[in-house]
Image (tube, rainbow, N blue to C red):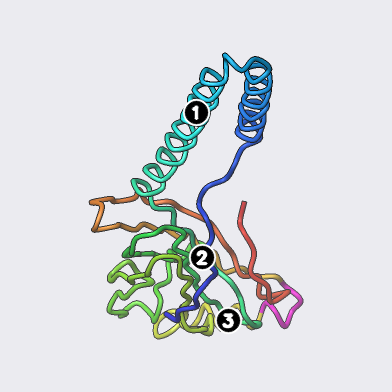
Amino acid sequence: MRTRKTRRQSRFTKPRWLYMLISLVGLAAVVSAFLAFRSQTEAASAIGSVALIITLLVVILYTHFTALYAKASAYPPVSFEMRSPEPGYFQFWIVNHSNVPVSCWCKLNATYEKRHLRFGGRDSWGGFYEGGSSFDVLPYQTVHGASFNLSVFFMGKDNDAWNDIIKRVKGGGFPRLRFGIQFWYEARELGFHSQRVEQRYYYDFGIDKMGLDY
């Protein structure tokens, strides 16, 4: 898998209600100070009111962002995608959106005409693409594997299926190689283990394109 650094982005989004709250609190502070300072005898009270409002605003903001940070840390978000960088090839991508390193696994579950195929043939040793080993992704990094020819699923005893695809394409057909990709990961620092999620893709040899199988 290759690594590509991505710009570090804030995980926090500021909803509209937060901007409205800040505006209202600020307006209230200005009005309160103006009314209080109209009388010299109320100057001390005005300062106290402004200080109280500012303190309240700081507490609200601190609580809001602390809650968001805690949620992001407890449930580190990670995503994956299957791409076709060029006709007849596939490439697997992983994006770690969190601030902790994660270990990822996947199983491609490739099938052609309901025949189950393994990466590297039926005698494959069961590496990353068969759920046999993990890959570590650092915080805020994007990684991708090498670009593999789709023929790696039709080696050995499954070569007859590859020949069938070639024959059907030459005859104007649109044979598809389907993937029921299972993906899961863990963040050891947090003791977090994700559930397995499944995403279906397909490669259409008739048009030489990868697509999502809804």
158 over 141 or under it: above or below: below
Q: Was residue 11 drawn as part of the magenta stretch in this picture?
A: no
125 over 204 or under it: above or below: below
Q: Position of residue 113 (x, y in %)?
A: 54, 64
Q: Position of residue 98 (x, y in %)?
A: 42, 57
Whether residue 79 sits left or right of residue 36 in the image: it is left
Where disc 3 sits, the SS reads strand
Residues marked 3 and 1 touching at CB (< 8 Å): no
Q: Was residue 171 drawn as part of the magenta stretch in this picture?
A: yes
Q: CA distance from mark 3 to mark 2?
A: 30 Å
207 over 13 or under it: above or below: below
Task: Look at mark 2 in the image and give the residue it sits on.
Answer: 8
Q: CA distance from mark 2 to mark 1?
A: 35 Å
- Indicate the amino acid at tag 2: Arg
* Residue placed most toward the observer, 103 or 14: 14
Give whichever of discs 2 and 1 has the lower sequence position.
2
* Residue at figure coordinates x 61%, y 70% from the top left: 203
Task: Look at mark 3 in the image and give the residue it sits on.
Answer: 89
Q: Which residues are magenta?
A: 168-173
- Indicate the amino acid at tag 3: Tyr
Give whichever of discs 3 and 1 has the lower sequence position.
1
- Mark 2 vs mark 1, foreground winner is 1
Task: Answer with the quarter of the image where residue 28 lies.
Answer: top right
- Mark 3 vs mark 2, foreground winner is 2
Q: CA distance from mark 3 to mark 1?
A: 63 Å
Where disc 2 sits, the SS reads loop
* Residue placed most toward the observer, 207 or 133: 133
Where disc 1 sits, the SS reads helix
| Label annotation for residue 51 | 1
* Residue at figure coordinates x 47%, y 67% from the top left: 94
